[in-house]
Image (cartoon, helix red, strand yellow):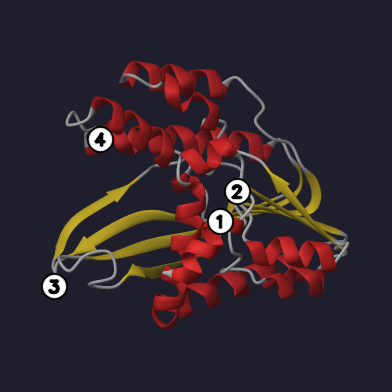
Amino acid sequence: MIREAIEMIFTPATSVAKKYGFVYHSISLKHRFERCKKVWLPHLKNCQDTFLQVVKDLPQKKSVVVLGSAHLHEIPLHLLVDNFESITLVDVIHPLKHHWAAKRNSRLKLLTQDLGGSLHELENLKSLEDLNQLIQNLSAKQLFHFEADLIVSGNLLSQLALLPMEALEKYIKKKDLTLAEKDQICTAFGEIHLKNLRQCSGQKLIYTDREVTYRNPQGEKIYQGSYPVNFDGFTKLREWDWILAPLKEASKDYSIEMKVEAYSSK
C-alpha cells in the first residue's frame, strides 16, 4: 500500500487524468500484472512472438510508435530498443519507470495523448443520446496521425469506450447501460480508432481482445460478450486465449478470460 501511494503521488499526470482515475488504474494494472504474471505468460509470449514476426519483415526499422503503451507488459522496452532507432510511447499516463528511461535514453520519447478523444467531454455526458452524439462527433475528426516504420496498437480497442461508459453510468446512477448498448458503444469507439489508424503512415500491428468470458468457480460459462469491429484491410496473424483474471483476482465468484486476436496492415 505504501509503494502504491508513493506511485500515486509521483506519477506525472494531468489534472483531468487524475480526476478520472487514470493514475489509479495504471498502478492497479501494474500490480495485477505482478500477481498474475504466471498465468499471463502465454499471452505475453504470443504478443512478443507476433511483434518479432512483424518486425522481421519490415523493410526498415528506424521508428516505432506504440499506442496505448501503458507499462509495456506485452512488448517490453528492451525489444523496442533492440529493434528500432527511435521509439515513441503514446498514452494518457506513462509510468515512472518510462519517465526515468526517457531521461536516460534520447531515443525514447513519451507522448501524452488521449487516443480516444473523449477525456475532456466526460462531464457533458448526461444521457445515452449525449454519448451517441459524442461518438458521431469523434467519427468526423482526425484524433491522431503518426508516421513510423511500425505503429502498434496494443490491447487498446476495447478500452477506449470504458471511461465514457463509466462516466455516463455514474451520472445516471442505477439506470445502467444494457449489455447490448455497451457492445454497440465499444464497437463504435473501436471503429473510430481503426479509421484513424488506417490513415497513419507505416506498417500497423494490432493485438486486442475480441471476446470476454466469465466463468463461475465450477468453470461454467456465466457470461460471454464481444464487439464486432470490422478489420477490413488488415490481415489476421493469430489468435489465442488469455486468462486475464483467475478466480479470486477480480472476484471470488468468477474468473475472466479473453480471446485475443492479432492483425497487421501496411
Residue closest to the eye, 136 or 166? 166
Task: Specify the quadrant of the image occupied by residue 229.
Answer: top left
Residue indicated by mark 2: 234
Residue appearing at x 74%, y 66% in the figure: 100
Nearest to N terminus: mark 2 or mark 3? 3
* Alpha-carbon span between mark 4 and mark 1: 38 Å
Residue closest to the eye, 165 or 4? 4
Residue indicated by mark 1: 9
Residue appearing at x 52%, y 74% in the figure: 44
Residue 263: image location, x then y, percent = 57, 56
- Judged by depth in the image, the label closer to the viewer, 4 or 1, is 1
Give yes or no for contact between labels 2 and 1 (Cβ–Cβ under 8 Å): no
Q: Amino acid at mark 1?
A: Ile
Q: Tag 1: Cα neighbours inside 10 Å, few (<14), some, or many (≥20)?
A: few
* Alpha-carbon span between mark 3 and mark 4: 26 Å
Residue appearing at x 48%, y 39% in the figure: 19
Q: Amino acid at mark 3?
A: Pro
* Alpha-carbon span between mark 2 and mark 4: 26 Å
Nearest to N terminus: mark 4 or mark 1? 1
